[in-house]
Amino acid sequence: MTGLKEGNKAPLFTAPDQDGRLVSLKDFLGRKLAVYFYPHDDTPTCTTQACNLRDNYRLLQKQGYQVIGISTDSVKSHKKFEKKYGLPFPLLADEGLQIVKKYGVWGEKKFMGRIFDGTHRTTFLIDEQGKISHIIEKPVSKNHAKEILTAGEAG
């Protein structure tokens, strides 16, 4: 779905996290980053994915990864989601759809016979120089941390 490719410079972004603090891609230069886009806070698959990343967060950090979640939900929604599940990483609010569109993960979806626009679950691994090292399209939510670690080893 995304027009971005491995080796491309990751599009810059700045958005508020669940605490209202502005977080920018530039804040992570010099570190490996897993940016995961997900449809909505506190929905079954998104919760499974977030909790898998939470449960494996120390292992991801040990391998050098910082984690950022991005959805089009509000700061307030992200705060409730973070508190309910004890999420240790920033969740960025992209209510204006700027980031999801820059990364090419916003578009037509089908669910239960309905067609609508929404966020396509996608993760971008970004290297220390700000380049996309790997793209995980349609991640398996219950095994997502392992997918990130495996892709990172291959990359």
Image (cartoon, rainbow, N blue to C red):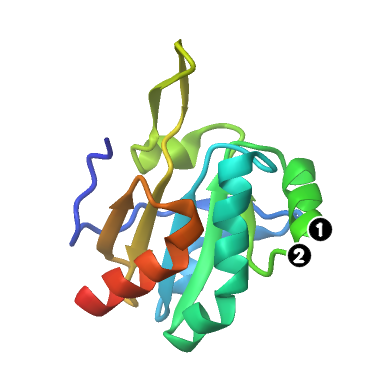
Q: How crowded is mark 2: few (under 14 residues within 10 Å), some or many (20 or more)?
A: few
Which quadrant would residue 129 be assigned to in this image?
bottom left
Question: As displayed, is residue 153 above or below residue 139?
Answer: below
Determine whether the residue tagged by mark 1 lies in a helix, strand or loop: helix
For residue 124, say whether it is visible. Answer: yes
In this view, 13 is above or below 33:
above
Q: How far apart are marks 1 and 2 (CA)?
A: 5 Å
Residue 152 picture quarter:
bottom left
Q: Name the residue under label 2.
A: 86
Where does the C terminus fall, quadrant-wise?
A: bottom left
Q: Answer whether residue 155 is visible to the viewer in this image.
A: no
- The mark tally for this picture is 2
Callout 1, which amino acid? Answer: Lys
Residue 16 screen position, x and y as percent: 66, 51
Label 2: element kind: loop
Q: Which residue is drawn at 44% across and 61% down?
A: 144
Comparing 5 with 147, the one in front is 147
Q: What's the residue at 66%, 42% (across, down)?
A: 41
User: Which quadrant: the N terminus?
Assistant: top left
The kind of residue on which mark 2 rests is Gly
Percent position (x, y) of residue 42? 70, 43
The residue lying at 41 percent from left, 36 percent from top is 120
Residue wearing tag 1: 83
| Residue drawn at x 27%, y 65% as measured from the top left | 131
Vertical relation: 116 (above or below) 19: above
Circles 1 and 2: CB atoms closer than 8 Å: yes
